[in-house]
Image: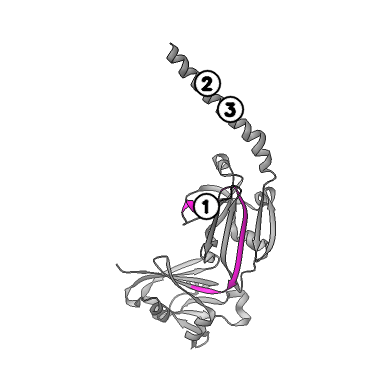
Amino acid sequence: MPQLSKKVLALAAIVALVAAGSFAYYAVLRPRSSEWEVSVVVDGRQKTFKLGDLEALAQQYNISGAGSVKAVPLLKLLQLAGYAGNATLIHNLSAVGADGYSVKLDNAFLYLSRAYVVLAEGREAEWGPARLVVEGVSRKRWVKQLVRVEAGTGPWVLALGVGNETRRVLGLGELRELAVELSGLGKAVPLSELLQLIGVSAQDVVSVEFVGADGYRVAWDGSHIPDAFVLLVAEPDLGRYGPLRGAVLSLSKKAWVHHLVAVNVVVRG
């Protein structure tokens, strides 16, 4: 019986601790969450979003690894903070949690279309009122209790990758040096020449994917590489297409991608 009494007392103590924790959350942390703020900084310009602001912007998203959640695309917050995105890209991005944990992303433009500020719902509350979630990136690099996101912009570039691993990043100046005149379309760089720069033979390519800054992606068969180009967009059309546009002359323009930021190929073997 004494042993049983000890077990009962231990169980009672655990229940009391859980109850105390719940009380602390609802009495202290939850009211504070209504005052939560996330600061978004772009090139030194800061805009602060209160939790109510984020809730007004949020929609329901089905995010890989996080499930169906209320969230705001990070790109939208960056745009509201002053990022235009027609001529520059977000190159560097850092996110900081209230506990001091921070994460930095280089070539951040490759992740922006998959980055979200997720708002707490149900069990999500354990991560704080807001957290940064990036699809396709290790959960260790997600940031709970998010309080600050800082981004730095830079010139437009093009990332060349194999199997989603970036091998080289080219600036507009480098692309201009490689460009040829394409009848009716202006300056363009043959995709076959870009592949040579990263040591890939067109004959070994199974598929190619063009990726836009907004996350729009189009994949097509490698047999179209001879007709594929990266167009250098002239000034009048920059607002519509961005500095770079992926084009495949033998395919419908639905397979063309404006505001091109990446070309990714899958090779045999």
Q: Residue furthest left?
A: 269
Q: Quadrant of the C terminus?
A: bottom left
Q: Sequence order check: which comes first, mark 3 or mark 2?
A: 2
Residue type at tag 3: Ala
Residue type at tag 2: Ala
- Please tell me whether residue 25 is drawn above or below residue 54 in the rendered image: above
Q: CA distance from mark 3 to mark 2?
A: 10 Å
Q: Can you give x and y, in whole percent of width and height, for residue 115 in the image?
A: 54, 57
Mark seen at residue 59: none
Residue that appears at 44% across and 15% down? 4
Start-end of magenta stretch: 138-158
Q: Which residue is mark 3?
A: 19
Q: Quadrant of residue 121?
A: top right
Mark seen at residue 142: 1
Q: Which residue is mark 2?
A: 12
Quick one: SS at disc 2?
helix
**Nearest the camera: 240 or 135?**
135
**Nearest the camera: 138 or 74?**
138
Residue that appears at 52% across and 52% down? 142
Tell me if 93 is positioned left or right of 64 in this view: right
